[in-house]
Image (cartoon, grey):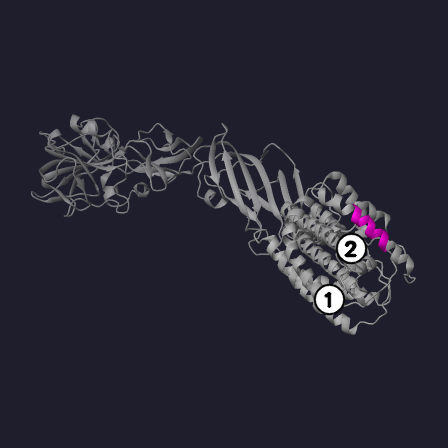
Amino acid sequence: MQEDKKRTTPPGESSGARRRRNRKKAAARPAQKGEKVGAAAEVTPASAAQTEETAPSTAAQQAVLDTETAVPTQEVPQKEEVTAPQHDTAQAESEPVPETVPAGAEETATTAEKAAETAEEEPVLTAEQPADTEAAAQHETVAAEENTEEEKVLEEESPAEEPETANAPSDSEMPAAEQPEDNEPQGQDTEEKTEATTEETLEKETAEADAAEKSEPEEPSSEKSAETVPAEEAETVQEEATEQQDDQSEESDADETEADEEELLPEEDEKRLSDLTRTVQLSVEQIMAQVSDETAAPENVEDSETEEADETDEETDGLVDQMRNGLSGMAKWLLLVVFFVLVIACCGVAWLYRNATPDMLPQITASFDGQTLEPTAYKWKVPVIGNVFKRTYADTFSSTALPLPETVDQVSPDFEISPSGYRCEVTVTDANDAVVFEGNTDSFSEFQFTANGTYTAKLVVHSDASSVPGDATVTGSETWLFSFTVGVRPSMRLSSTSVSQGSVIAISVGDTLDGSAPTLETQLENAGFYKANTGWVCYLPIPWNEPTGTQKVTVTAGGCTETLEFTVEAAEWEYKDYYSQSQRVSPYIGANDLPTAVEKLLTESEADIAWTGSNFVQPFLNTLDVKLGYGTTEYVGRSYSERDSNTGAGGRTATNTVLTTKSGELLIAPANGTVLLAKDLGGDYGYTLVIDHGAGVKSIFYNLQKIDVKVGESLKQGQTIATCGSTTVAEMRIGTVPIDPLQVWRGQCNALKYY
């Protein structure tokens, strides 16, 4: 081909003219590239498949072009030039590129890598910028640089050059095409191949120009961009490839025209033309590479982010697995340690449990009313490991109450617990299972049984846990269930074992369980029992004429009955003998001569004993002048023998005391009491005053001159109650039986001191 150009080059045309002509062509190429690239973007599936097959060889050619463009080369006369734009896909497959690496290939590859890096740093064409303008500017710049390099080459290049070889694959990861090795110098064979290639190119250029829009671009980078870049960028790349083909066609037409007019171009011009072609191809490839890198950059970023996320997940999973394995191992070790500790602890607990023997149980004794109680059940917990774990001892000896052998004869029996300090609970029920008491032993000491009978008691002694922290004590309870009979016998006694006629004997009875008054069975008249300070009391009057001897009385109190005996002794009574009836003392009021108003009052009496603590005193302030004493009998007309033996009939005995008093003498109350009657009854009775001292004891005064108190008035001992006349009759009765008032006033009646 070089020989043909030499033959067609005008003889007068200089290298400068050729450069100017080439510049004009380069300026016209961008407009054509825009149209052809669009046509090249329409790639059919069949052409895409063919392009993929030719990609390796084309990549190898691109690597060679990159190397030659980046480094100023020397003239190689025998170099075989293979360019992608000048041949279709079938020719690229049939004409392999030699793979022989010439000397300095490593330096050339390094230079190509630097040129690729420089191309990547250049600004990338965007969709908004006009593709034609920018491409034209870039080609002008490249053409200027090439012209400068060509001038330098003409001055410095040597006649000999090393054969051109294919470069190693670049960093863009494009597969290098396998080319046949050819390290021999190219001579005549090279020229023949060049001529053949030129002829084939001239034949196909016209057909390719007509079918540019239908044919597949031969530029490998165009096919690659159609697969990897977006639609807009692929159109730009294909336009550039089509433009390159048009340029090559125009150059071929120009070469043919010049071949007719000029001689063959010199070798320097042919080399420059070849370099210019390579430069254009390199520029297109750089633009396509930049667009491809920008398109692939987001995908690479996404892939790298995905890879980083996967790596992070893998690291996290690995860390979790390591932690899980570590925790699992630690858990197994801890379980083993816990197992051995539990075994040792169980052995220790078993030993301690075995040593918690019944000897450690509390020894408690209980008694009731002096009688020892037998336990019926217990439940104790002996500490094994402090207060946390205890051994229990429990047993029931009897489910029924154990009877006590002796009768309880106290109203308020007590419990005795030894040792003390335990918490005790007591429950007592009667024969009808009614609860009569429930509480502790302290409150039971104040309890009193209200009736005799059979009772059931339950005593429970508790041992509570200590309030001192860390103090392990035996806890639990022991139970005593027993039955007993309450037969409380109240005290019954007489004030004396003997009593004289006309006097009083007292019967004292202690408190009864039910609080009811005792009853008395006797032949003697009585007022019954009255409540006293220490139980009950009954004042039993002895009439002046009661036969002497032993008297029996039967007392019943609280379900208990007792017979008491005492002796009635004869009193030394006086008697008087008169010759006539007129000599007898007047007024006389006998035992059966009571006025009706007074007799009605004898059966009524205050329950309270009014003279307690003060007893009785003499109601008259002056010396007593007794005209007729209690128990004195007046006789009229007895014989001397009857007088000597104190026998005979017709006598009358005084049951009261007739006193000679001074008119206007004051009368005082002999003891505390209440006025029952203050009235003038007329006749021998005159002004009559009745005072109730309680317990059936009454004081009666007749024949008074004046009464100073009223009925119902409470009297105090020594209080003035009336004024006496010349004669006053004083009488005391217990119930309906009169007694000697002088003994009472003078304090000679001990029975009235029992209250």
Find out whether the residues at labels 2 and 1 contact each other: C-beta distance under 8 Å. Answer: no
Q: Residues within 10 Å of mark 1 (few under 14, many from 20)?
A: few
Q: Position of residue 345 (x, y in %)?
A: 73, 52
Q: Which residue is mark 2?
A: 260
Residue 338 in view of the camera: no
Secondary element under disc 2, as helix, strand or loop, is: helix
Q: Which residue is mark 1?
A: 15
Q: Position of residue 573 (x, y in %)?
A: 26, 37
The residues tagged by marks 2 and 1 sit, at their Cα atoms, a distance apart of 19 Å
First in sequence, mark 2 or 1: give its number: 1
Is 81 situated above or below 637? below
Q: Quadrant of residue 99?
A: bottom right
- Residue type indicated by callout 2: Asp
The boundaries of the magenta stretch are 194-203
- Magenta span: predominant SS is helix
Query: Between residues 452 and 374, which one lies in front from this camera angle?
Result: 374
Query: Between residues 409 and 241, which one lies in front from this camera angle?
Result: 241
Secondary element under disc 1, as helix, strand or loop, is: helix
The residue shown at (33%, 33%) is 529
Q: Position of residue 220 (x, y in %)?
A: 75, 50
Q: Residue furthest bottom?
A: 156
- Residue type indicated by callout 1: Ser
Q: Position of residue 233 (x, y in %)?
A: 64, 49
Query: Between residues 504 and 381, which one lies in front from this camera angle?
Result: 381
Foreground tag (2 vs 1): 2
Q: Residues within 10 Å of mark 2 (few under 14, many from 20)?
A: some
The residue shown at (69%, 66%) is 145
